[in-house]
Image (spheres, coloured by chain):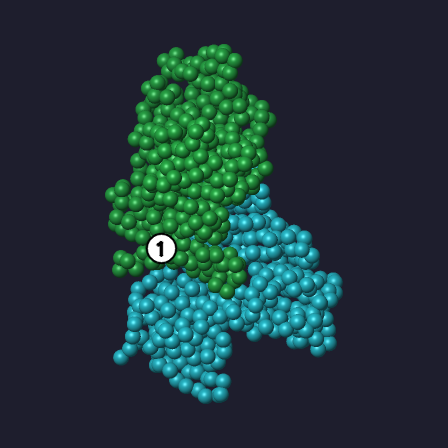
Chain colours: A green, B cyan
Amino acid sequence: MPRRIIIIGSHAAGVDAAASARKTDRTAEITLISKERRVGYSRCGIPFVIGGHIPKMDDLIVYPSAYYKMNKLNLITETTVTHINKDEKTIETLDKTGKTETLPYDSLILATGASPVIPPIKGKEKQGIYVVRTLEDGERIDAAIKAGAKSGIVIGAGLIGLEVAMAFVERGLQTTVVELLPQTLPAMLDMDMAKIVQEKFEEKGVRVITGTGVSEVLGGDKVTGVVAGSEQIPADILVVATGIRVNSELAQEAGCAIGAFRGILTNMRMETTVKDIYAAGDCAEAVSLITHRPVLYQLGTVAVRHGKVAGANAAGGYAVFPGCLGSSTSRLFDVEIGATGLTEALARRHGITPLIGAVTSKTRADYYPGALPIKIKLVFDRESELLVGGQIVGGEEVTQRINALSFAIQKQMTLRELMKADTAYTPPLCETWEPMVFAAETALRKIR
Amino acid sequence: MPRRIIIIGSHAAGVDAAASARKTDRTAEITLISKERRVGYSRCGIPFVIGGHIPKMDDLIVYPSAYYKMNKLNLITETTVTHINKDEKTIETLDKTGKTETLPYDSLILATGASPVIPPIKGKEKQGIYVVRTLEDGERIDAAIKAGAKSGIVIGAGLIGLEVAMAFVERGLQTTVVELLPQTLPAMLDMDMAKIVQEKFEEKGVRVITGTGVSEVLGGDKVTGVVAGSEQIPADILVVATGIRVNSELAQEAGCAIGAFRGILTNMRMETTVKDIYAAGDCAEAVSLITHRPVLYQLGTVAVRHGKVAGANAAGGYAVFPGCLGSSTSRLFDVEIGATGLTEALARRHGITPLIGAVTSKTRADYYPGALPIKIKLVFDRESELLVGGQIVGGEEVTQRINALSFAIQKQMTLRELMKADTAYTPPLCETWEPMVFAAETALRKIR
């Protein structure tokens, strides 16, 4: 009898888990179940559709229905999994017509994702408050702008919040960002680096209010603004991007242990604490390559890697997820922002005494036209001199530098090794002394 | 008495050696001696000035005279060192007025560089044959184009040859490249990757003739064309870019051992085999990080690293050059080309059985407009699964990927480690699965 693999969720983690399971076991019965009508899309693209870079939300569907057929994957959409029976190894489902079903599994993969959280602000039930998670969410925001919205407020200055704020500007809205913490991108950058990002937004006409909570949503039925601190700020639409919370109800009910970040705990094979149940993607905690402790990086890149490992193991193979660094990147207006590993602040929180190397340089040879500024901040562990993090804000060529730093952290490169690294150079694309190397050198000067 | 450090040569290696010596010893007498009138310039920029990207050759002077003053460096230009007396520890110089002088040194750094070689082709003494090494060389080519040249031939399809050919196209010349070896960029790329480069040049109207030598330069006093194979190709100007040969006469005369590539042999501290004489830059061989044997990578990035180590040691410090990978990059028309470590062909020559991972992907998410093709070829050692080389040709984001691969090679990353590397992603700048990771995966499939 073929192995029966059920995957709950069908985006980055779910589909990659299915593909990986199929590669491992050609004959398994693999079923993907999703609440949504449209599946297999890239959430990360939603702000860029709103901003007008990509024609429509449906363009973000990366896996067309042909993909599932080709890989012999059963795809069940608009269906909710209501219960996991771990002893019988079955799940119960409820479809949109109200029909329930019980499906048996040999292996179950939870790729249940996470859901946006709207903080308990007075007036949060009004019309005109949006989140950014699904294609429908994106379409609603787009429709509100098309319907004549002239101004927008984004609560939360994380990557998604800032990407939506940029989209608002691109659509001509007067835009305000309100962030409770004292800086933009608090999970990604240290304050000094975040300042550059904030200045860029202000330069583009966005008002950025940090260190301030929103206490009330104003308006009758419909949003007309918010109260932030002691000030009333008017707006036609309001996007809340203050974070997402793991969809862990099913897992908890089945007895899967939950971690410190409210994610489903997994081991190196992406197994939960319940036999034959795996977790992958935004719902799953996995280990950090630096701290060797569970982390919850809710990123597409992490999701696909989780999925690949969970899928292989669920199908009887053997795969290990070695850990992650939370490498992330974005382009906000004309700057690229990237980070990997620990920030200075996070390093301290983990008991690491940070040694900082930082440099402001240019992206091309001094004499080559079009050179753009780039600022690199490296975080080393002062004791071991190991690289533990990097942050870059620059006009171009940021993302792959983050990948270079990620490789360096993964392979435990030290400050002195990075200082001697061999780098490539040509006047139109970089400087003779690569700024990453130069940044490492500035750190060395502090310990001599 | 202050330490007397003499540096022969004053470009990348020489100036970085001087700067490093100054950092190490604040009181040393540091003297740079150059044959040239203009020094401290970036040779790598010359083709881009010819192509019109940069206004004039003088813009390539990276170190203005103020730099030498600020660092208390004596700069002696238009002066030739005619002899090294290693027993007395003196050098003899000859300036442009015919005056000779004897200068004592405690440490001597040879940054004598290399000179273009014109192969012994019939008619090579004619007017209108140029090389690309000094600012004067660049100015001569520029003047010839301004004087009305309508067509140009470049002999040699290495990086400099192709960069000059691109400049010719940018200046409106009908352009032909003739290469003796069967491919473009033979030192940098394997044949399969070089094909993409050749096609790009052909698409831009350049005729690229490979596997063919030039047997004769045609014309009376002045070049009118060449004979390549059995064919006469007319041209108003001819650039020879078939390689450079180390300026090693002084070193040889002083008894410094010369290596297999005709470079001056050095140890890990950039010492030659003669006491208190160091070598750095295009004239110096140093060890490969992969083969652990001397190599001669004549690159600006290698020169500055050599110089830094030689300068520190010459000034009484202690520094080690750990080896290099020959990482290099360029932008040719609208493609970027980069390489690091060994090509497949070179790996074989070193007794490594290559295991190849290769992928053609895109530089952005599929649905994001403006995505450009990128091809990545990785070379692993089949036995150890260690990464030993990488080549990339793509529309954007190539250089820093080369740096990432360089870091990976330096830290001995294996195929399976690269497959699990943590990478950064955002739709406008890359794919969810980084193509480098994907390329590694294709290699794994071959050993399963």
Q: Chain of mark 1?
A: A
Residue A55 to residue A80: above or below:
below
Residue B3 to residue A304: above or below:
below
* Residue B440 visible here: no
Q: x, y percentage for residue A142? A: 53, 34
Q: How many marks on residues?
A: 1
Q: What residue is shown with label 1? A: A358
Residue positioned 43% across, 29% down in the render: A220
Q: Quadrant of residue A289?
A: top left
Residue A223 to residue A88: above or below:
below
User: The C terminus of chain A appears in which quarter of the rendering?
Assistant: bottom left
Q: Quadrant of residue A305?
A: top left
Q: Amino acid at mark 1?
A: Ala
How many neighbours does mark 1 have within 10 angstroms: few (below 14), some (14-19), or many (20 or more)?
many
Q: x, y percentage for residue A269? A: 38, 29
Apparent side of residue A158 relative to residue A55 in the rendered image (left or right): left
Residue A280 to residue B401: above or below:
above
Residue positioned 48% across, 22% down in the render: A35
**In this view, which residue lies farthest toward the front?**
A220
For the residue pair B353 and A406, the one nearer the viewer reads as A406
Q: Quadrant of residue B310?
A: bottom left
Say which element carries label 1: strand
* Residue A151 visible here: yes
Residue positioned 39% across, 53% down in the render: A376
Residue positioned 49% across, 88% down in the render: B97
Q: x, y percentage for residue B273? A: 38, 69
Q: x, y percentage for residue B312? A: 34, 67
For the residue pair A360 and B124, the one nearer the viewer reads as A360
For the residue pair B316 and B256, the one nearer the viewer reads as B316
